[in-house]
């Protein structure tokens, strides 16, 4: 029997996953704007026409990946926090370490998620929505440990969101830098991020933001 006939035919689910894996790698390496469907097809080991059987456009393919990987990242960090000590400082240490462990173990996924946002309006809107989701998740974490201290703020919700955004931007920015300096141990990256972010949060948690 010819080799081609012996080769097992991929199921629709397997083919779809192969497309997503190939697209994630190409988006990570080339960025959304620089990636072509032909390159994605080559990375997936299929023909370009097959991609359109599953994804009508490059935008929909990117959005699917963004939503999937963001959910995986949030779940990864959430699982780590579920087993963390109650003290806010230790919980923050565990959460930050989990975030950077995800970056370390899922380099293509992370790079795809946090490259410069594309100009495509549909994909850019997805980026913004997922960014808000990430900020909300961090805000929920901070509220669990320092929410009472923020109650005295004129606008506690806004103060909480500002703290959450600061932590998110710090993590993402440092992770981008770390991508170009992979020789630095994760432990050092986590330590520096905590040194930068923890001082303000600690003061709020202990003194309600008062000097």
Image (cartoon, rainbow, N blue to C red):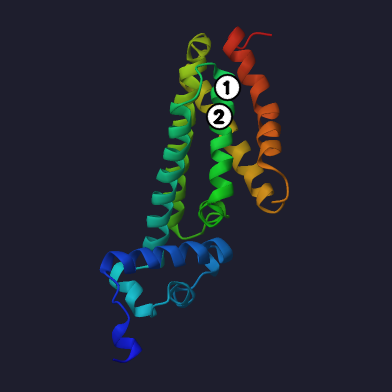
Residue 186 lies, in percent from the top left, at 66, 41
The residue where tag 1 is placed is: 90
Local SS, label 1: helix
Tell me if label 1 and label 2 are in contact, CB under 8 Å. Answer: yes
Query: Residue 11, how many percent across, how many down?
Result: 26, 69
The foreground one among 157 and 43 is 43
Estimate how packed mark 1 is, as few (under 14), some (14 to 19) or many (20 or more) residues with alpha carbons within 10 Å. Answer: few
Q: Which residue is mark 2?
A: 94
Residue 179, position as x, y percentages in the image: 65, 52
| Identity of the residue drawn at 51% across and 69% down | 35
Q: Distance between the Cα atoms at labels 1 and 2?
A: 6 Å
Residue at 63% of width from left, 45% of height from top? Answer: 175
Residue at point 51% right, 59% down? 119
Comparing 56 with 182, the one in front is 182
Which quadrant of the view contains residue 140? top left
Judged from this view, the residue extending furthest toward the bottom is: 2
Tell which of 138 and 100 is nearer to you.
Answer: 100
Judged from the image, the secondary structure of the residue bearing numbered disc 2 is: helix
Q: Quadrant of residue 41?
A: bottom left
Q: Residue at x 32, y 73 (%)?
A: 52
In the rendered structure, the answer to whether residue 144 lies left or right of residue 169 reads: left
Q: Residues within 10 Å of mark 2 (few under 14, many from 20)?
A: many
Residue 131's x, y, as percent? 47, 42
Is residue 155 something one can see in this rendering?
A: no
Residue 46 seen: yes
Quarter holding residue 50: bottom left
């Amino acid at each position: 029997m010819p080799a081609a006939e012996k080769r097992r035919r991929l199921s629709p689910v397997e083919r779809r996953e192969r497309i997503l894996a190939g697209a994630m790698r190409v988006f990570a390496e080339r960025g959304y704007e620089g990636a072509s469907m032909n390159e994605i097809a080559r990375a997936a080991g299929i023909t370009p026409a097959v991609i359109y059987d599953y994804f009508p456009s490059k935008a929909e393919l990117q959005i699917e990946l963004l939503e999937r990987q963001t959910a995986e990242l949030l779940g990864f960090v959430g699982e780590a926090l579920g087993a963390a000590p109650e003290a806010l400082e230790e919980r923050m240490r565990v959460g930050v370490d989990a975030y950077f462990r995800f970056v370390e173990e899922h380099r293509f996924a992370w790079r795809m998620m946090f490259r410069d946002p594309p100009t495509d309006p549909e994909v850019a809107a997805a980026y913004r929505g997922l960014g808000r989701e990430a900020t909300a998740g961090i805000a929920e974490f901070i509220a669990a440990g320092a929410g009472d201290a923020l109650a005295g703020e004129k606008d506690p919700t806004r103060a909480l969101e500002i703290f959450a955004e600061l932590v998110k931007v710090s993590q993402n920015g440092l992770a981008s830098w770390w991508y170009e300096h992979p020789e630095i141990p994760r432990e050092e990256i986590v330590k520096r991020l905590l040194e930068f972010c923890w001082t303000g949060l600690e003061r709020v948690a202990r003194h309600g933001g008062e000097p």
